[in-house]
Each structure stands twice: as structure tokens, then as C-alpha cells.
């Protein structure tokens, strides 16, 4: 009940875990590593597709057809597990070896087999050995030497002398380092949420693009405009920010066909919701799918329309006094206590 984020009903524990999780994934090093790894792994994925479905000599017509969903499950496995734990995963290579009659992945077969077993183990919440090994690696690394950029390393070192924010927050009881069970919970949540939900969302995106060729054409035009004459170069973080219509497609697919359609939460105190009184510790299920299809919030909610996310901001917002210091209070979170702004309609 008090582990991780997704199913954690203990508010104090959830808030504590969320602080570490967001601190890790919002760090520039983590973002850079994610972009680098996405490029590297997608190139690997394409190489397997080329060999199985597109190379010369593939005679059978049905060899050009594939179930794309398992491929994206393996892709997100390798991506998320490496990002979160720093342990390289080769489940795409294992899946390629299963499908290929002759050619095998350019990885030692023992390494691929070991990785597949490792992924099955880690998804069953068995991370003790990884955490123990990573703690030892961190302990043996001098303070002036860089560490890996994965999430596990980041949250192990949080609130220790390795943390750049160490000693900046006074409440040491609240801002203590994470225990091994807490580390297991947060990494397990990240793997489950990052692999299955991402893989399914990619499949849903492909489905909707195939059914809406006008949307697909508009998306390809945006990609052509951003990448111009070099379609094979690695994608950058700036590209991600500039691919606005691609982002709109992801948001609209996630809205109209939610991978996670509800979330449970537990009331810490008695409360009134929907005109009814509810006792403390009542489990409330938030119906995400109903929210995403509510006509009060969405125009034509059952219509697939990425353009609904392309509405430009109507307002200009600026600080009243740019010389004034930022007012904050620090506890488990560093909160902004006041931010005075001027707001006006955009010309």
C-alpha cells in the first residue's frame, strides 16, 4: 500500500516517492540520455525489420507482414530498463532470434538469453541484486568522477553527498535517502508504466494514422519541414520541442484511447465528493476515460482530431517585477509561495 507511485495509497509515502521520481526524470542528464538511447535503439529495431521483412531474397509475401505490437514491447523494454536501471537490455535481439530462420542478432547468444531472463525477473520485482551492485559501484567511485545517468543511480544518490542539492533543505528526516524497498517500488512502477503503456500507445498511434491519412500527411509534412534534406540524422531534443503536430497526435491518441482508463486513490481524511460524504480511507477510482470523453470539456469528444491541441496560447504573461526574488518554501517539495504576473491578450 505504501510503495511506489501508481498504486500507493499512503499519501505521505506517495509524495515522498514522487519527489524523487520527478527529480530524476526532469534532470537534463536523464533527458539527454533518453534521446540518445531512443536514437540508438530505433536504429537497432530498423536493422531487424530490414533483415526480416525488407531485404532482397525475402520471397514469401507474408514475410512482409508483421505483428508490430510485440516489437514495440521489446523496444520499450530495452529503452526503459536501460534508462531506469543502467543495465543494458537486449530483448529486441532475443525476439529477432526467435523470428529469424537463419541470421541471428549480432550479440552473443548467452548475453541475449541472460537478458531475457533478467527482464522477466526485473518485471517480477526482483531487483535486490541490481540495487546492491549499484550501491557498491557508487561507493567505489570517487566524488569527483561522474556516475551513470540512469534513474536508479540518481535516486540512490539523492540526499547524499553525491546530490548537488545536498544540505540545501533543512528537514533531513523528510529528505532522507531512499531505502531498498522504496527503490524497488519506484523503479518497478517506472518499468511497468514506461514499457507497457508506451508500447501500447505507439501501436494505437499507428492504428489511428492508418485510418486518418490526412492526419498522417500533415504529420509527415511537419517531419519534412523539421528534418529537411536529412531524414536519417539522429533526432535531437530541439526536434522534439519543434514537432508540435506530432505531439498533438500523441496527446489526441492518448485522450481518445487511454491506455490507463482509471486510477485508484485513497482518501486521507473524510471529504465531500459529488454531493456525498465519504469516510477516511475510502478508495476512490478516478475514471480517466470518462473525463477524456466528457462533452463539458471536449468539443466532439468522440472525434479523432489532433488539431484540438494546436490552439495557440491566447495570453501574454510577464512578471510584474523581474528584479524581485522568487518566493519559495522548502519541505518535501520546494513550493512557490507567490508569483505576481501581468496578463494580457496576445496580439
Image: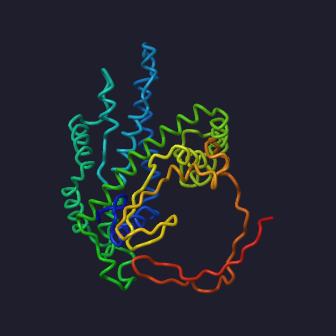
Which of 154 and 192 lies nearest the eye of the viewer? 192
Which quadrant is home to the N terminus?
A: bottom left
State left or right for residue 324 relative to residue 272: right
Q: Position of residue 70 (x, y in %)?
A: 38, 34
Q: Is residue 159 left or right of residue 294?
A: left
| Placement of 165 over or under 137, stated as above or below | below
Residue 124 spot, x, y in % from top left: 24, 49
Q: Observer-nearest residue: 270 or 157?
A: 270
Measured along the vertical axis of the image, is residue 163 above or below residue 297? Answer: below
Q: Nearer the viewer, residue 239 or 144?
A: 239
Residue 340 percent location from the top left of the image: 65, 81
- Is residue 13 positioned above or below 40 on the image? below
- Is residue 88 toward the left or the right of residue 139 in the image? right
Q: Is residue 175 above or below residue 44?
A: below
Q: Position of residue 211 (x, y in %)?
A: 59, 31
Residue that protrudes farthest toward the right in the picture: 347
Q: Quadrant of the C terminus?
A: bottom right
Q: Residue at x 70, y 61 (%)?
A: 313
Residue at the image point whose x is 56% and y is 44% from the top: 256
Q: How is the image coloured?
A: rainbow
Amino acid at each position: 500500500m505504501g510503495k511506489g507511485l501508481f498504486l500507493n495509497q499512503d499519501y505521505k509515502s506517495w509524495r515522498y516517492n514522487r519527489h524523487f521520481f520527478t527529480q530524476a526524470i526532469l534532470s537534463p542528464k536523464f533527458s539527454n540520455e533518453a534521446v540518445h538511447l531512443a536514437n540508438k535503439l530505433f536504429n537497432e529495431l530498423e536493422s531487424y525489420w530490414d533483415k526480416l521483412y525488407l531485404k532482397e531474397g525475402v520471397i514469401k509475401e507474408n514475410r512482409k507482414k508483421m505483428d508490430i505490437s510485440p516489437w514495440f514491447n521489446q523496444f520499450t523494454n530495452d529503452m526503459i530498463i536501460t534508462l531506469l536501471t543502467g543495465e543494458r537490455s537486449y530483448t529486441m535481439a532475443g525476439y529477432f532470434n526467435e523470428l529469424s530462420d537463419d541470421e541471428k542478432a549480432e550479440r552473443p547468444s548467452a548475453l541475449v538469453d541472460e537478458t531475457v531472463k533478467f527482464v522477466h525477473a526485473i518485471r517480477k520485482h526482483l531487483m535486490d541484486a541490481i540495487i546492491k551492485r549499484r550501491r557498491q559501484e557508487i561507493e567505489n567511485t570517487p566524488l569527483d568522477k561522474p556516475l551513470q545517468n540512469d534513474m536508479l543511480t540518481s535516486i540512490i544518490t539523492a540526499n547524499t553527498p553525491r546530490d548537488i542539492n545536498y544540505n540545501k533543505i533543512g528537514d533531513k528526516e523528510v529528505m532522507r535517502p531512499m531505502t531498498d524497498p522504496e527503490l524497488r517500488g519506484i523503479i518497478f512502477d517506472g518499468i511497468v508504466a514506461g514499457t507497457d503503456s508506451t508500447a501500447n500507445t505507439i501501436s494505437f498511434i499507428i492504428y489511428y494514422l492508418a485510418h486518418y491519412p490526412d492526419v498522417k500527411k500533415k504529420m509527415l509534412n511537419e517531419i519534412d519541414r523539421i528534418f529537411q534534406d536529412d531524414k536519417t540524422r539522429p533526432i535531437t531534443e530541439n526536434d522534439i520541442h519543434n514537432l508540435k503536430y506530432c505531439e498533438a497526435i500523441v496527446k489526441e491518441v492518448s485522450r481518445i484511447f487511454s491506455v490507463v482508463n482509471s486510477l485508484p486513490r485513497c482518501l486521507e481524511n473524510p471529504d465531500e465528493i459529488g454531493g456525498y460524504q465519504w469516510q477516511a480511507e475510502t478508495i476512490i477510482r478516478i475514471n480517466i476515460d470518462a473525463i477524456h470523453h466528457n462533452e463539458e470539456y471536449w468539443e466532439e469528444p468522440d472525434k479523432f482530431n489532433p488539431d484540438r491541441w494546436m490552439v495557440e496560447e491566447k495570453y501574454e504573461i510577464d512578471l510584474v517585477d523581474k528584479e524581485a526574488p522568487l518566493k519559495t518554501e522548502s519541505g518535501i517539495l520546494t513550493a512557490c509561495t507567490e508569483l505576481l504576473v501581468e496578463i494580457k491578450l496576445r496580439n
